[in-house]
Image (cartoon, rainbow, N blue to C red):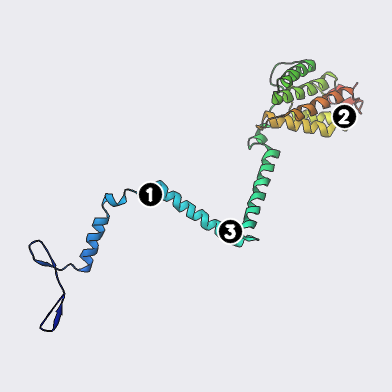
Amino acid sequence: MSIVGGTTTHPLIRTSSDLPVDISRIPAREAAERELSKPVYHENDPNLLERALDRIREWIGALLDAASGAAPGGPLGLVVIILVVVVLCAALWWRLGTPGRTAATTGTLFDDGPRSAAEHRATAETHAAAHRWTEAVQERMRAIVRSLEERALLDPRPGRTADEAASEAGGALPDHAARLRTAAREFDDVTYGGRTADERAYLRLRDLDTDLERTKPHLSTVTGGTAE
């Protein structure tokens, strides 16, 4: 800066040829934008996926903040509500099985040729000895129904489901009707609902089978046959 004749002057930008260059604001901004748009300045920028994930995290964070503000007890109350919902969903899943269970429970009880109750029991015990509880439960339920057919408490009928067998047998053996329904439900759960049986489930069916063998029917006749 210099003073000439009492007037203050500002230095001008000069080029290599010593010609003054006066750059206005708009061209200077455009030149800076062009310079900053070069790839060398963006090598460490997040990619499209990272930016999308950041936006999602921001959205979820904002949603949780809003929910915690509305929930009783603030953030702690929101956590409790989420845990309760998770527990309820898990309980419903355990009780109802997989979504395909309802449509599949119309499947028949027997899927092979006719076999005696003793044969089904022997197969069930073989599976149980190998800790194949799902197969053991299936065979024990078949043994129960076949035994009831052999005793003429059930009319031998192809295509009968476990639920139908339990319902029909419960009329002749009312003291065991609830256990028969439970056994049929367990059979459906492991056969069509994607559930896995355990030792306790098998022992329940085995005990039911033994008790039914010792029980006399309350009615003198049942559908399709004569009682003992």
Q: Nearer the viewer, mark 2 or mark 3?
A: 3
From where the camera sits, is residue 184 visible?
yes
In percent of width and height, residue 225 lies at 86, 22
Residue 162, located in which quarter of the rendered image? top right
Secondary structure under tag 2 reads: loop
From where the camera sits, is residue 106 visible?
no
Closer to the camera, 66 or 221?
66
The residue most toward the left is 17
Badge 2 vs badge 3, beta-carbon distance below 8 Å: no
Residue 36 left/right relative to 201: left
In percent of width and height, residue 177 lies at 84, 32
Q: Nearer the viewer, mark 1 or mark 3?
A: 1
| Residue designated by label 1 | 46
Closer to the N terminus: mark 2 or mark 3? 3
Closer to the camera, 52 or 118?
52
Q: Amino acid at mark 3?
A: Ala
Q: CA distance from mark 1 to mark 2?
A: 71 Å
Which quadrant does the N terminus fall into?
bottom left
Q: Residue at x 26, y 52 (%)?
A: 38
Q: In the rendered view, tell whether residue 84 sits above or below residue 33.
A: above
Badge 1 vs badge 2, beta-carbon distance below 8 Å: no
In percent of width and height, residue 138 lies at 72, 24
Residue 17, located in which quarter of the rendered image? bottom left
Closer to the camera, 57 or 22?
22
| Residue designated by label 3 | 67
* Disc 3: CA contacts within 10 A as few (<14), some (14-19) or many (>=20): some
Secondary structure under tag 3 reads: helix
| Residue designated by label 2 | 173
Q: How many marks?
A: 3
Closer to the N terminus: mark 1 or mark 3? 1
